[in-house]
Image: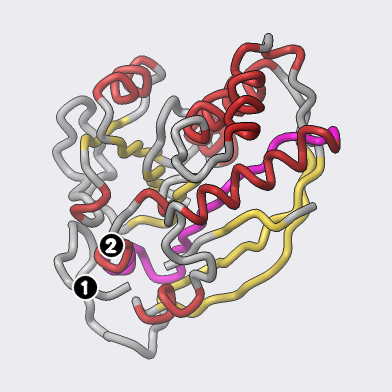
Amino acid sequence: MRTVVDLGAGTGAGSRLLRERYPDAAVTCVDNDPQMLRLLREQGFAVVAADLDDGFPALAGSLFTADPAADAPVDLVWAFSSLHHVTHPARLLSGIRRALAPGGVELAALPRFLSRPREALPEQRFHAAAAAGLWNHHPNWTPVIEAAGFTVIQSEVTTTAPSNPAACEYARQWFARFSHLPALTADDRDSVENLLERRPDDIELERRATRTVWVATPDQNQQQGMPTGGASNDDEAHSSSQDAPA
């Protein structure tokens, strides 16, 4: 593993985990928020300022950090909680397909956090309100991914993780996004605001979660000779993961 790209890296929570998991790889973070880019740069990441609606960005010549591996094909693209924000994902996914090295992989996910029933049920409604607002344009990503020229393997993955202050703060960031959903009922909006008012150590997070995961690798039987690297303008459609109820 030499080159990893984190799309929609945000504060760098996932980027740090990727750097720990692949210490010999160059991790490049992509985001379009100046504040997030500053935070990522302060953590020592190569960063690229880009709007994912414009497609997969060119990685060479980052404005902030010179990355000697930026011109190399990408081994792993990680899009945790970012694909659902993209209005036209086909363009982005096509660009990912072009940038990936043979055997490269792209993964994405949407999180769930709460474990106590009186809070877990409202969180399910938060996600339903997000779906009603077309937050995730493709709940089943398989056809879109395959149309971009990938072989897709779908599976159910259960993970456990410790509940720590960083995880609680990340959960609060998600709840802040939910608070702006127009489809929320008045009661659910009050529930979100209550969560945001609580101390991070007073939020009991779910330690066990089940996700439906789509792992996609370039289909070598399609589009042989496709160039690697750079953004694509083709309106084709890679891999995604979305939480299923635990």
Cβ atoms under marks 2 and 1 closer than 8 Å: yes
Magenta stretch: residue 52 in it? no
Q: CA distance from mark 2 to mark 1?
A: 8 Å
Is 150 in front, or is 202?
202
Among all residues in the image, which is located at the extreme bottom? Answer: 221
Residue 188: x percent and y percent?
Answer: 63, 34
Residue 153: x percent and y percent?
Answer: 60, 75
- 70 is higher (above) or lower (below) than 162: below
Residue 152: x percent and y percent?
Answer: 53, 76
Question: Hey, which quadrant is residue 99 in on the image?
Answer: bottom left
In the structure shown, which secondary structural element does the residue marked by tag 1 occupy? loop
Q: Which mark is residue 162?
A: none
* Pointer 2 or 1: first along the chain: 2
Magenta stretch: residue 107 in it? yes
Residue 223: x percent and y percent?
Answer: 27, 85
Stretch in magenta: 93-116
In the structure shown, which secondary structural element does the residue marked by tag 2 occupy? loop
Dot 1 amino acid type:
Asp
Label 1: which residue? 235
Question: Hey, which quadrant is residue 206 in on the image?
Answer: top right
Q: Residue at x 27, y 75 (%)?
A: 236
- 187 is higher (above) or lower (below) than 193: below
> What colour scheme governs how the chains and residues are painted in the rendered image of this protein?
secondary structure
Categorize mark 2 by other alpha carbons within 10 Å: few (<14), some (14-19), many (20+).
some
Label 2: which residue? 88
Dot 2 amino acid type:
His
- Left-right relation of 21 to 179: right
